[in-house]
Image (tube, coloured by chain):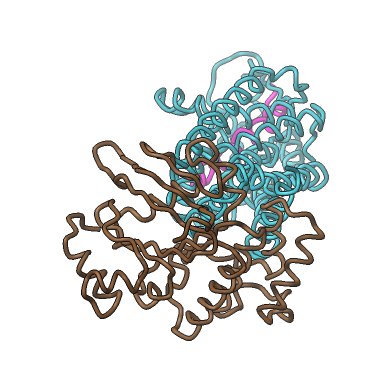
Chain colours: A brown, B cyan
Amino acid sequence: MSDTQQIVISVRDLTKRFGEFTAVDRISFDVARGEIFGFLGANGAGKTTAMRMLCGLSYPTDGSGTVAGFDVRREGEKIKRHIGYMSQRFSLYNDLTVWENMRLFGGIYRLTDSQIKSRSEELLSRLNFLDERNTLVGALPLGWKQKLAFAIATIHRPEVVFLDEPTGGVDPVTRRQFWELIYEAAEAGTTIFVTTHYMDEAEYCSRVSIMVDGEIRALDTPARLKEQFHAESMDEVFRTLARGAQRAE
Amino acid sequence: MRHNFISFVKKESLHILRDKRTMLIVMLIPVVLMILFGFAISTEVNNVNVAVVAPNRTDSVSDAVDRLAHNDYFTFKGYIAADDIDTLLRRGDVGAVVLFDSDYDRLAADLAAGIESRPAIQLIVDASNVNTASSATAYLQSILLGTATAQSMFETRMLFNPQMKSAYNFVPGIMGLIFILVCAMMTSVSIVREKEMGSMEVLLVSPVRPVKIILAKMIPYFAISCIVLIMILLLARYLLDVPMSGGVWGIFSLSLLYLLLSLSLGLLVSTIARTQMAALLVSAMVMMMPILMLSGMLFPIENLPKFFQVVSNIVPARWYIDAVRKMMIQGMPIVAVWKNCVILLSMTVVLLGVSLKKFNDKLE
């Protein structure tokens, strides 16, 4: 990462303790604008807690960090306005139409009516979904839903998009298409912060961090990580690191 | 600021409108309950078949029987022989039999003169339905007493509900029940649904304040409840002829307060329950049972064991139903039930405070 690049997420010694238990143990990293940052770790490694702190949902016990230029301790509400979020668990409201979902999330992020209109037209035409604007989301195939959810998560043009296992349960072809959307967004200057369980997806990331027992044990480009661990694939890298984990799920 | 709140209210309303089945149930239940309790289920005496045994049909006996036959609540089945009493009652052909003593005229005169003698009339009543039997007995006695010239020690007058119509009693009860059902149950389920689906997380990451999410959820349910309230009041007034002499506005404003209370209860349930099923069960068991049993809706509170009488004090529906009854049937103005208003208001404030605090604590 060169110095000319703008840092969008910067974290120093970020820690979260619940009583005796240290969920996130002094993690530090920087993410530059337009980067696709893979945030890996087994279940229970502390990924979700770390992500919640970055999203302004959880207050750090120790350490500091900024997201989109706002302090994670003091400016949680401002952070929320400048990030997008999408999780695999829930993408969109099934009983609302495509357009109603767009209007809702546009409204939540305080876009004006005309902004919502023009941006949703633009998103729909880019996805070739124009005919589906009045379809109930529940009637769409899962893969379409995920793509649409990603589009809607970026409807307010956030600086950073947090994707929490966005492609869970989706077939490989759709996953591929989904990643094309991610690339497009990253090229347009949106920073992507993504957690995933699929190691082939880790290969698509610009840089990858691997969390074990609340700490970041490795952080580099996929190519250099493979070199460092003398591994053929990211899967091997991950398994080498995860083998030493103390915490069960 | 205004914009994202309105998009939220729109979204909640759409959720409700799209769920046609639930919508239908919410709108139908009050109507069905009103009609059911108003007409079908009644503890009043209606069309009890009465037969008469009168060995001596003197003028005074015929007078008494005439009055019986002309009464709306009894159907006179004719004179029968004493031997048939048992068969007729057993077959259910008659619900009550009136036996005049063969010496009726003399016995009645003795009674009037204060001379002790044996009873002049015997009533034999089918008591397989205790409620009907006891009201029928009481009513028969009051009709026949006029004939036995004996002066009663008591003069009884039924105020406010002289015909003892049970619908009068049930309407406030139904209101107490239905609003908890619509507000508390549906709000809690809809909040918990968002938690279960994971959408709550997406909303929390957005710049919408949690309090706004909750308020936006409450508004559509509040609106539905208002419609239901108006429906119930109209049905009560024009279908069941409930007097509402205490003023409709008093009843209406008190009900609005009760709606707020129910919404706060729903919010509280939603902070406790993790799944929609749990929310449903908590609302049904923890809220419906006390309302049915401890609110005075079905059983008078004075008839409960002492322990439950004390417990009933914390059941909001008890205070609401009591106040509505007073306003609807006794015709008291809202000022007269100020105590109930104050209690309900304080309950609302406490519940809303606790549940909002719990909701916020949960977020961390």
Q: Quadrant of the N terminus of chain B?
A: top right
Residue A149's spot in the image, x, y percent?
A: 58, 68
Q: Is residue B52 visible?
A: no
Region rendered in magenta: B123-149
x 35%, y 64%: residue: A220
Relative side of B77 to B279, left or right = right
Residue A141's spot in the image, x, y percent?
A: 56, 80
How many marks overall? 0
Decide: is A230 above or below B99: below
Name the residue nearer the viewer: B180 or B17.
B17
x 70%, y 26%: residue: B326
Q: Residue A148 falls in which quadrant of the image?
A: bottom right
Relative side of A129 to A66, left or right = right
Q: Residue A132 falls in which quadrant of the image?
A: bottom right
Decide: is B76 above or below B158: below
Residue B357's spot in the image, x, y percent?
A: 51, 32
Residue A22 magenta: no
Residue B132 magenta: yes
Q: Is residue A225 visible?
A: yes
Decide: is B217 above or below B252: below
Relative side of B132 to A103, left or right = left
Name the residue nearer the viewer: A102 or B324.
A102
Residue that protrudes farthest toward the top in the picture: B114
Residue that protrudes farthest toward the bottom in the picture: A173
Residue B60's spot in the image, x, y percent?
A: 73, 33
Q: Quadrant of the C terminus of chain B?
A: top left
